[in-house]
Image (spheres, grey):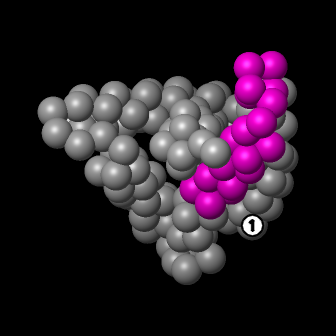
Amino acid sequence: MTKNTDFKPAIILGMHDAIVSLTGLIAGLFFAFSDANIIIISCIISSITASLSMGAANYLATKSKNSEIALKSALYTGGTYMLTCFFLILPFFVFSDRTTTLIISILMAVFIIFIFNHFFYRGKSFYRHFLEMLLICSIVSVVAFFIGEIAKEIFGI
């Protein structure tokens, strides 16, 4: 029987990919569209399809190495992905002000990264992993912001 710590890579994959991709999507859509409903619907659809895709990809990758844990690993990845997305989308249902929603969603991403690293990386490596994940998420979000601005200009939204 495997230990839960064997699924650490699956959890890291799901959580980190969800934060990077969904925070980037939220930032890009936020600056491209003024209607929060478009952002919510796009994020929900993206979250569901991406969590299924990530779970399936992890299943296939893990099965090629260790078929005994492939399904459980896939469930950890997809489940972590979906749970992370839930918390990133939640502010859109709680707050009506667009700017507040974006700020809370970004703060939620930072909080998730912090909590995740607190439980998985103790000691000296905590800060290194926390800052690395935060930097990657920030870069993707800034790139998505520029993509959103460019799309807004090109399509006249």
- Main SS of residues in magenta: helix
The percent coordinates of residue 42 (x first, y second) are 78, 53
- Quadrant placement of the N terminus: top right
Please tell me in which quadrant of the rendered image residue 144 appears. Answer: top right
Q: Is residue 150 left or right of residue 136?
A: right
64 is within the stretch colored magenta: yes
Task: Write down the residue under mark 1.
Answer: 37
Disc 1 secondary structure class: helix
157 is within the stretch colored magenta: no
**What residue lies at 30% left-to-right and 40% top-to-bottom?**
121
Please tell me in which quadrant of the rendered image residue 154 appears. Answer: top right
Q: With respect to residue 65, does 147 lie above or below?
A: below
For the residue pair 34 and 43, the one nearer the viewer reads as 43
Q: With respect to residue 62, does 2 lie above or below?
A: below
Residue 105 appears in the picture as rendered: yes
Q: With respect to residue 66, does 73 lie above or below?
A: below
Q: With respect to residue 112, does 153 lie above or below?
A: above
- Quadrant placement of the C terminus: top right
The percent coordinates of residue 148 (x first, y second) are 63, 36
The percent coordinates of residue 68 (x first, y second) are 77, 36
Q: Is residue 52 left or right of residue 10?
A: right
Mark 1 belongs to which amino acid? Asn
**What residue lies at 80% left-to-right and 43% top-to-bottom?**
71
Residue most toward the top? 64
* Mark 1 neighbour density, 10 Å: few (under 14) some (14–19) many (20 or more): few
Please tell me in which quadrant of the rendered image residue 145 appears. Answer: top right
Magenta range is: 62-85
**What residue lies at 54% left-to-right and 49% top-to-bottom?**
4
The percent coordinates of residue 137 (x first, y second) are 45, 35
